[in-house]
Amino acid sequence: MDLNSSIQQKMAGNALSGMIATGIYLVSRLILTPFILNYLTLAEFGLWSLCFIILSYASMGGFGINSTYIRYTARYLAEGRQSEIGRLLSTGIACMLVFSLLFILLLYLFMPLIHDIFQIDKAQQPIATSIFLGTAAVFSLELTLGGFRFIINGLHEIAKEKTITTFAGLAEVAAIIAFLLLGTGIMGLLYAYTLRVILETWSCWQVTRRLLPGIRLSPRLINHEHFRLFFVFGGKVQALGAAGIFLTALDRIFVTAISGLAAVGMFEIGRKLPFTAKKISESAFGPFLPTAAHLDASWEKESHDSPAKRSRNYLHITFFIFTAGAVPTLFLPSVNRMLPIPAESLAPLLVIVSIILFIPLRKKHRHGERLSKGELRMLYLNGLRYTNLVSITTFAFLIAAATPLINAWVGPGYNEAILLMIFISLAYTMQLSTGPGNLIFRGIDRNGREFEYLLTQLVLVLLWLPSATASYGLAGAAAALAASSSASAIFFFWRSNYTFQISLKELTGHTIIPALVPLIPAAGIYIATLAVPSGSRIETILIALGYAILYIAVTLTILWYTVLNADEKQRAADLLPVFSASKRKP
């Protein structure tokens, strides 16, 4: 059974609007970055980046809350219980208010320790304290009242939410330019961030009231049932979000600790373009969670392991990944020098141990849960197909045109960022490939697969990232990210494809081979970058734009005639306003 066509079209429209909105927001940030670097030093730019590392840890507190809003709003809508949404929202706001107040207090108390951890000079400590506490206060407002956004998502009205965030983001860009021109320095970034959060929060509340005219917020609506939802389902997602955000920030933490603020500023420049592409592609995943929750799950073989059994399974996976991942680590110079015995003698022993651990893991895997073949299976398989097409198309170009893109964006003098951009693009490509599956599992309240994936990635990052950074500097850090992302994604698909009853042959034909098509025009672009010499900044910008236009035109043409079937072409045409308008004409 395939997905209902109306659901498909709604998902496609929401995904497209999410990508467009995120693209506008992030591209505006890319254009803004060279302007900011004219008014801030590289150390100040690194300080602003570190500020949001701290906020990323705080956002762990809201991760499960947000997913709970989306999942149960979608379920209440499907069951005709819209009156419960007000109780859900009131309870969530109460939870996040308490958390936000606690977060600000702890941040204030631990500020001297934060200065030491990030090696902030004494001269910079007063402004760092103001920035850290100021952004924390604004972020806490966003965290406490952010439920309005996620209620809109749960109602399958993602396009409306993205419209709001787009306009608020553009207002922030305008404010940043104005404040920097007025000489406010790094504090101007804080003032603009405050403006965006206020505009976004107020607008989302107004839209929520229009979509749900009868919705009420009151302390009297806070109840035990919804506390349980937030702390049971939300708690599981919370752990996943904490692991994911911790992983996201680890690269910059290790780079800062080993190489200092200027290095993390360079790393941020190399990461910025891939991160922008990642967020744009990632924004297409939003509809998967509410759609999976709306459809719910039908199991052919279902099991409910006890917490003790699940813990043993996670521990088993951890030991297997650690022993297997430790093998290449032994040969890194920073580790090899510290070994009491040669790596060539220790590596075979670790290989044998990892094989011994893998055999019972494979046996458990073959007796795991399996979904019935139906709508969720097709949602997963098509999700992999479309999101991989989008992400590989994007990242293949970033890799092929890395040199002119970096030179066009920030100018000469940032050659180290080019190699960083290539490795980080590879890492994000693999991370994004798991997005649809993770959100579908979350939507049907089966978070174990996502936890296994994040656990695998965490172990590998902790093994490879610090040792590779110590051995090869920034390039080693980026290469370690690419390797850990690839290995953990492979493990995730090995586990998940069994659950959805998808064979390697079906996965290869439906998803992998079509996604490799953009590599052909990307290879042509790379050859062109070698043949065309670098010129002035303006010439480089024009050349990079020319590469992008040529690449998009050729790639879309090849995909249209060799990959997309008739139904996919029709759905793509329906999403384009010019086609939709022509269809409505008599």
Image (tube, rainbow, N blue to C red):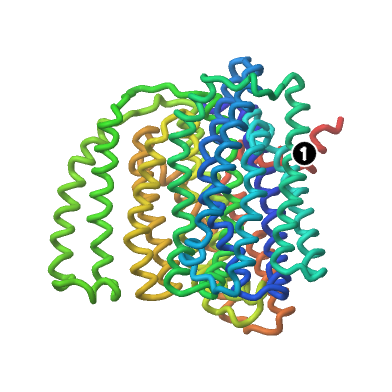
Q: Nearer the viewer, residue 499 or 23?
A: 23
Q: Which amino acid does the dot numbered 1 rest on?
A: Ser
Query: Residue, x 52% and y 77% (percent of image)?
Result: 416
Q: Position of residue 185 (x, y in %)?
A: 73, 69
Q: Nearer the viewer, residue 195 or 293?
A: 195
Q: Which residue is mark 1?
A: 203
- Judge whether 283 appears above or below 337 on screen: above
Query: Residue, x 65% and y 69% (percent of image)?
Result: 547
Residue 219 seen in the figure: yes
The image quarter containing residue 154 is top right
Indicate left or right for 323 with 499 as reference.
Answer: left
Q: Position of residue 118 (x, y in %)?
A: 49, 66
The C terminus - image quarter: top right
Q: Position of residue 27 (x, y in %)?
A: 69, 59
The image quarter containing residue 464 is bottom left
Query: Residue, x 63% and y 45% (percent of image)?
Result: 140
Which residue is the extreme one toward the top? 80
Q: Secondary structure at mark 1?
A: helix
Indicate left or right for 506 with 577 as reference.
Answer: left
- Judge whether 553 appears above or below 13 on screen: below
Indicate left or right for 279 with 370 as reference.
Answer: right
- Judge whether 578 appears above or below 69 on screen: below
